[in-house]
Amino acid sequence: MYGNKVLAVRDGVLEMHGVPRTPTWNSLASTASPGDTTVTLITAVDWKAGEVIVIAPTSYESTEAEERTIVSVDNTNPSRPVLTLDSPLLYQHFSGLQTFSNGDFIEMRAEVGLLTRNVVFRGDPETSQAHQYGGHIMLCSPGDESLIGRIEYIELYNVGQAFQLGRYPIHFHMIGTVYNSYVNGNSIHETYNRAVTIHHVHYLRVTNNFAYNTMGHTFFIEDGIETNNLLQNNLAIMTKPSFSLLNTDQTPASFWITNPDNIFKDNHAAGSTRYGFWFDLDPNPTGLSFTPLVCPDRSPLGGFSNNVAHSNGRYGLRIFHKLVPATYPCASAAPDWTNTTDPYWRNPLITAHFVNFTSYKNKKNGAIAEQVGDVRFENFKVADNLVAGIEFSITDQTMDGTAQINGAVVIGRSVNADSKTTSTFSHGIITPRYENFQVHYANFHNFDVAGKAAIGSCSHCFHGAATDSGARTVTFSHLQFDNVSRKIQYQYPWKDIFYDLDGSLTGLGPKTWATPYFKFNEQPECIHDEPQYNGLLCNSSI
């Protein structure tokens, strides 16, 4: 069961404690440029000369992470330590706080992770790298609280075994509740199979860890039965694909989440070939944990707040396939459409709040929700994403429009923009191909170059996903536009209905409308504005 090159634990206690490091990862205080041999950090550190760090990418390329050895630490200003590096940097690593005239801001800073620890767990140097076959820690025991694993402030490298299921650097496997266990403050790098695996365990704390240069999903919640685990203040840099495990490991996520009933807060996903955070939810748990009594895609969200994603090959946050939290997750999901005021009265939907998410410089979207119920993106900040800042595809269609964006700062071109940013067609927000979505308190900045628009319509309809002619209604209120040349650019099939509750979209007053232009829609109550609105604006009498 446990394999070889392994530290295995059953019916016991594993204690691995290195010297505590403060902090385990940091951020740049100012932008570092190619050729620089010093970097300034934003908070005090206990890091020392001779230790090794990694600086995260802030471009669109996850491979622009750079590993360096510290030559010296200048603590003249203890709150802004200056590190001298052993060789010049090759790439720019951005750090800045951009503010706007209305008080909006976005903070984008390259993370800096500390690899060095005084206690080291490693695969043998003679064969591990050559065969991608390193050491691993496996904690597997027959039931709740039947073992304790406390692993903190150690360094793991040349770990994990490619092509082998279940051979991960740190692996809690099929135990149940593990209230007394934790994985805290470790560095995990040069791995051949993930970093931390949570498999059929509950109440595990995974905090303050730094994972770098990993193959496959980095922080990995395996079967979909895992609940009440805490992942907080972890940093992942350079997540790479693996072609030997799950199909999804070919398109990996720094945080792969198969059950939403866990807590994710203060984590940073800084450069994956595909995704930062991926909620990949099935109707029931898979593998050894299968049961029809647990339904992940209809379970409540434990918590998602203050997370950051950037420099990912596709999406910063992806919800796919489905997240429709309900009071009774495994009861009937069928709405009663004869009850027009509350079609979910038999099994009420539960709101999932995704809060305070920052996502920038991703090659597709800052965030995308592909099939959701009462899912609300609140206080999101997105910038320089090449397809869209935020996109919803398929949403719940209740009369009150439960799925919504409620608070967003959406930036088409930030001070960290480059030629790829400005030359790529993109939207700030793309609305669903289903009815009654809502967008409130969204502020759009710097959509001022050709091919960029603040708002788009009908997510994925152009790819043949729509089965009808569109004409879905989206409600807007409390919008602001700053340096925006085109407010709307509709997408195929160009038959959307945008309802402006307070006049902040159309400028025509409350309860007015925007819709694509068709000759037969020309009415005396409407004006045709192509440059800004790509269609018709109609007053409240329509």
Image (spheres, rainbow, N blue to C red):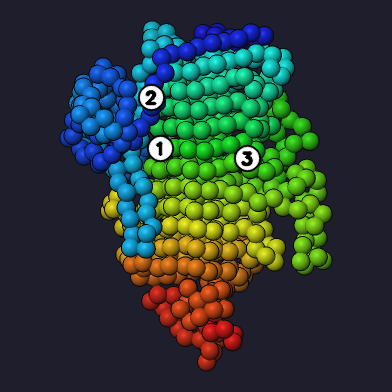
Residue 142 position by quadrant? top right
Residue picked out by circle 1: 270
Q: CA distance from mark 2 to mark 3?
A: 28 Å
Secondary structure found at label 1: strand
Residue 22: assigned label: 2
Q: Is residue 439 above or below residue 505?
A: above
- Residue at position x 58%, y 59% in the image: 404
**Mark 2 burial class by Cα count in 10 Å: few <14, some 14-19, many 20+:** some
Q: Nearer the viewer, residue 15 or 435?
A: 15
Residue 377: assigned label: none
Q: Which residue type carries mark 1?
A: Ala
Q: How many marks?
A: 3
Secondary structure found at label 3: loop
Q: Which residue type carries mark 2?
A: Thr
- Residue at position x 53%, y 53% in the image: 378
- Residue at position x 54%, y 32% in the image: 231
Residue picked out by circle 3: 302
Q: Which residue type carries mark 3?
A: Gly
- The quadrant of the picture occupied by the N terminus is top right
Q: Earlier in the sequence, mark 2 or mark 3?
A: 2
Residue 104 x, y percent position in the rendering = 38, 57
